[in-house]
Image (cartoon, grey):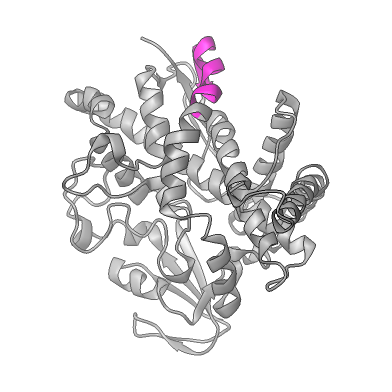
Amino acid sequence: MASIVVSGYQLANETLRMADLRQALYDEGAILMDKVLVNLHGQEHRQRRNIETKVFRRDFFQWYETQVFPQTLKETLAPYLASGKTDLVDFGFRVMMNLTADFSGVDRPLRTPEETAQLLHILRTFGKAATLGQALGDKEAIKAEIQQAMDEFDQVFFRPSMQRRQTLLAELASGQRSEDSLPRDVLLELLRNAPEHPIEHEVLMKEIGFFLLAGAFTTIHTLTHAVHEIFTWRTEHPEDAKRYEQDRFFLQRAIHESMRLHPSSPTAGRRPTCPVHLPTGQDATEQDMVSVDLMAANRDVGVFGADAAQYNPHRPASKQASPYGLSFGMGMHACVGLNLAAGLLPRADAREQDHQWGTVTLIVHELLMNGARPDPDRPGVVDRSTIRNNWSSYPLLFGV
């Protein structure tokens, strides 16, 4: 078995678009990730993605960003503002859990601190499945912990959520309910399409658990890195300090720049489904691992300039790549939540009042407007349980 590394931006882009390379990054996390969307390939992948992307239409993102998320954000932030401090990682989990639960289809009927803590614990444990391939600890012990969290999620959250949606769909079919009264989430769409595209209970539960994980886990990674880059740049370039708060287009570009430097996973793993000839000129078989080095590709000086390895919120737009590089993938496994997290790239005539910013920009803007700054007595802590470049803690203070 050969291990082939692809690192240049153009070669990485072309490799990720190859239809005969399947997702392999999460093979070791199969306990949760087996048969979920990110690991499917070919016709099965297309069918499920076509069903689920009905939720992720642009009008959904615009509606959620303007009608739902601002209130959720303010409610989640309020107790931290009252105390004058927070840990960005913990806050990020809490605010993103509500968002991802909404579009995944996970109900939280009690809305109590205990229920929130229970789902947060499950969500954090699910995160260990996504990084199991890069974990440094006892992997069998981690798998046992993940299985326990899956069983708890199934009984406490998933089954009641599924049963409620089955009832709603039955009421729709009998004329007792209108389409507009149904929730807009992935679980409902999968259940609606179950007669034509049935999914086993365990796979359906894992699929919803995966969406709950993917939406929160990757956004928290992006959020923490973006805030750290902004604070560092502000210290070194005080002339831009107020611009982050006053110019949201500048803030969004700055966040895209951080997304380029800090993809959620440093690599994208692929395995051929048949013998293939790669854009690198190499041949690969089903036994080989193709590792696309996203960190290197996103720092390609031929695409992003001589200072491509550094954070620069003023970076000129590249004609060859998006400002966030390949961090959201390309091809069939490109992230379905791209617009939700990153927003839309602004057109020349874009206006603040109707532009879609993405949840990360909205969160960071709210933090900055409330005087968020690093806690000098409690520096951020890097997560050493995995080789991924994540923060496990990032304390903040609020106010002047």
Q: Position of residue 232 (x, y in %)?
A: 31, 30
218 sits to left or right of 11 = right
| Residue 129 seen in this snapshot | no
At 21% from the left edge and 43% from the top edge, which residue is drawn?
350
Q: Is the residue 324 above or below the residue 123 in the image?
A: below
Up the image or down, 301 lies above or below 161; here it is: below
Indicate the quadrant where residue 371 lies: top left
Q: Quadrant of residue 357?
A: top left
Which percent across, then down, holds residue 394? 49, 28
Q: Nearer the viewer, residue 261 or 43?
A: 43
Question: In the rendered view of the protein, which quadrant contains the N terminus?
Answer: bottom right
In this rendering, is residue 100 above or below 302?
above
| Residue 81 colored in magenta in the image | yes
Q: Nearer the viewer, residue 176 or 146?
A: 176
Quadrant of the drawing holding the C terminus: top left
x and y, in percent, of residue 128 in the image: 65, 49
What's the residue at 46%, 80% (across, down)?
19
List the single residue furthest toward the front. 175
Q: Is residue 206 something that shows in the picture?
A: yes
Residue at 34% in and 51% down? 260
The residue positioned 40% from the left and 20% from the top of the image is 372
Q: How many marks?
A: 0
The residues colored magenta run 73-86
Report x, y in % for residue 294: 39, 60
Foreground residue among 37 and 375: 37
Q: Is residue 229 left or right of residue 18?
A: left
Magenta span main SS: helix
User: Does 95 appear in magenta?
Assistant: no
Foreground residue among 270 and 1: 270
